[in-house]
Image (spheres, rainbow, N blue to C red):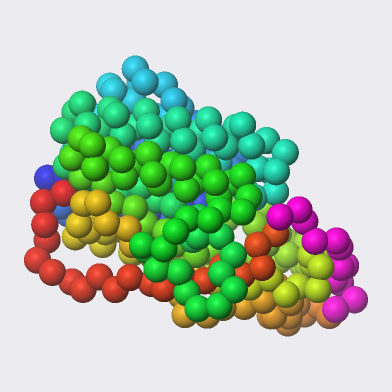
Amino acid sequence: MHKVLVTGGAGFIGSHFVRRLLRSTEVSRVTVLDALTYAGHIENLGEAFLDPRLEFVHGNILDRALVDSLMARHTAVVHFAAESHVDRSLSAAGDFLMTNVLGTQTLAASAGRHGIEKFVHVSTDEVYGSIAQGSAREDDPLRPGVPYAAAKASSDLVALSHFQTYGLPVCVTRSSNNYGPHQFPEKVIPLFITRLIKGEKVTLHGQGEHVRNGLHVEDNCAGVELVLREGKPGEIYNLADGTDLTGRELTAKLLALCGADWDSVLHVPDRQANDLRYAHRRRRLHHQSPRRW
């Protein structure tokens, strides 16, 4: 039976993943390690606490002693914990480097010491930077354009270096923008919906020409779980939907859903270093007989 440590498991994506894991009879323990910063809330786990296999630990991935004590009791790690908001990274880049890079190093080193059978590092398509045309593939160069993306790209390399140097069975997933229930309202979809249903204005950067791909959180979690079960160590897996929308197109859809019109939209100057287009090709993982984690 598998025992999985999930870092950042009280966050938006992590909490969805934890509930998904607990639906598997192959899992005997799920431990959530979360610092409960502004975007992590223990309430996100909700009914998952009814399952006796779930344990919650309030702590930081930079705490080596704590990480070691937890790692010793698990067979696999899924690493969601990260500073993740682009706008905040512009003014607090040091915090992003500390958590995303040094935190990943702390976890990977501990996983190696304790013989972890699978380490899934959850990343983002933003590490590829702005793509003028076509789609980024997993072996494309990393060209992060903002501090958040740079910190995630660095953490990807840290994790993969532990595979190359020490043989730690690391897989990396890179997803496009997630959306879905319980998302913290700093992200565009919950932020716009929250404001529009209150009759407030929403802001659109520039002319809304920036292109993003949206991926429902449950679809991302399904991909992460498949990588956990069947991913090949040392490999990177892009996870994406097939729909690309400009900021203006997304805004139009949200306005229609909330019964609002364009009078509710304020155009504001584009933010600093706003990548014009993210696009990456998804990796297809075919179902195979389960492999050892």
The residue most toward the top is 65
Q: Residue at horizontal 50%, vertical 60%?
A: 128
Q: Residue at horizontal 70%, vertical 43%?
A: 90
Q: Number of marks in the image?
A: 0
Q: Could you say where residue 47 lies in the image, as x and y percent from the top left?
A: 40, 49
Q: Indicate the quadrant where residue 183 lies.
A: bottom right
Q: Indicate the quadrant where residue 7 lies.
A: top left
Magenta stretch: residue 59 in it?
Answer: no
Viewer-proximal residue, 178 or 146? 146
Q: Could you say where residue 70 lies in the image, as x and y percent from the top left?
A: 28, 27
Left/right of residue 196 with respect to residue 163 in the rendered view? right
Left/right of residue 197 with respect to residue 282 in the rendered view? right
Quarter of the image for the N terminus: give it: top left
Viewer-proximal residue, 220 or 280? 280
The residue stretch that appears in magenta = 262-273
Please indicate, yes or no, whether residue 182 appears anywhere in the rendered image.
no
Q: Residue at horizontal 31%, vertical 45%?
A: 160
Q: Residue at horizontal 40%, vertical 68%?
A: 137
Magenta stretch: residue 266 in it?
Answer: yes
Q: Could you say where residue 57 lies in the image, as x and y percent from the top left?
A: 39, 29
Q: Could you say where residue 153 lies in the image, as x and y percent from the top left?
A: 47, 48
Q: Is residue 293 above or below residue 222?
A: above
The residue most toward the front is 141
